[in-house]
Image: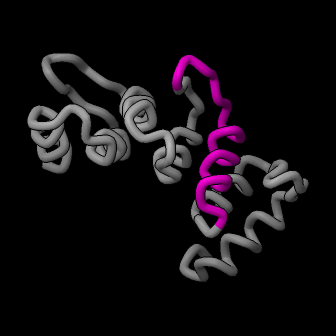
C-alpha cells in the first residue's frame, strides 16, 4: 500500500520531509515502532523543511505546531501562500476557511476562490 511505501522510505531515511508529508496525506502511520497521526507527519515534514508550501497547506486542514509555535488553519494557509503565491490549492483552502489577509491585503472568501480558479481551472 501507499502507507507501507512511505513507512519504508522513512525507515530508510527519517529525514525525508517529502515522505513525511506523503504519509500525512495517507492518514499517518507507524515509523520506527511509533504511531504518527497525519498532523504529526505534517509537523515532522515542516520541522525538516519549513519552506514546503504543500506541507503548510496540508497542516492547514487542522492547524498544529511547528518549531514550538502554534499555527491555526488560516496561519498555515497564509504561510503556504507566502512561500508560493501561485499555489492554487492553497488559495482554494484559504477560501474554504473564509479568506484572510495575505501579503498585507485582506482577501475575501470569494476572491480566494477566484484566484484559485484563475491559477487552476481544474479546481472548478
Q: At x 86% / y 58%, what residue is drawn?
A: 107
Q: Is residue 26 magenta?
A: no
Q: Where is residue 124 in the image (x, y as percent from the top left)?
A: 62, 77
- Front residue of 16 and 5: 16
Q: At x 76% / y 73%, what residue is drawn?
A: 114
Q: At x 87% / y 58%, what residue is drawn?
A: 108
- Front residue of 107 and 104: 104
Horizontal side of 7 relative to 113 (left or right) equals: left
Colour scheme shown:
one colour
Q: Position of residue 46 (x, y in %)?
A: 45, 36
| Image-quadrant location for residue 75 | top right
How many marks the image carries: the answer is 0
| Image-quadrant location for residue 3 | top left
Q: At x 11% / y 32%, what residue is drawn?
A: 11
- First to last magenta residue range: 67-85
| Image-quadrant location for residue 13 | top left
Horizontal side of 55 relative to 19 (left or right) equals: right
Amino acid at each position: 500500500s501507499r502507507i507501507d511505501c512511505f513507512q519504508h522510505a522513512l525507515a530508510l531515511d527519517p529525514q525525508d520531509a517529502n515522505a513525511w508529508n506523503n504519509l500525512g496525506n495517507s492518514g499517518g502511520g507507524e515509523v520506527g515502532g511509533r504511531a504518527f497521526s497525519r498532523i504529526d507527519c505534517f509537523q515532522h515534514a515542516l520541522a525538516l523543511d519549513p519552506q514546503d508550501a504543500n506541507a503548510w497547506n496540508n497542516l492547514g486542514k487542522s492547524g498544529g505546531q511547528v518549531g514550538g509555535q502554534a499555527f491555526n488553519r488560516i496561519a498555515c494557509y497564509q504561510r503556504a501562500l507566502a512561500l508560493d503565491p501561485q499555489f492554487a490549492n492553497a488559495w482554494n483552502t484559504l477560501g474554504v476557511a473564509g479568506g484572510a489577509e495575505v501579503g498585507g491585503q485582506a482577501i475575501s472568501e470569494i476572491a480566494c476562490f477566484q484566484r484559485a480558479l484563475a491559477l487552476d481551472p481544474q479546481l472548478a
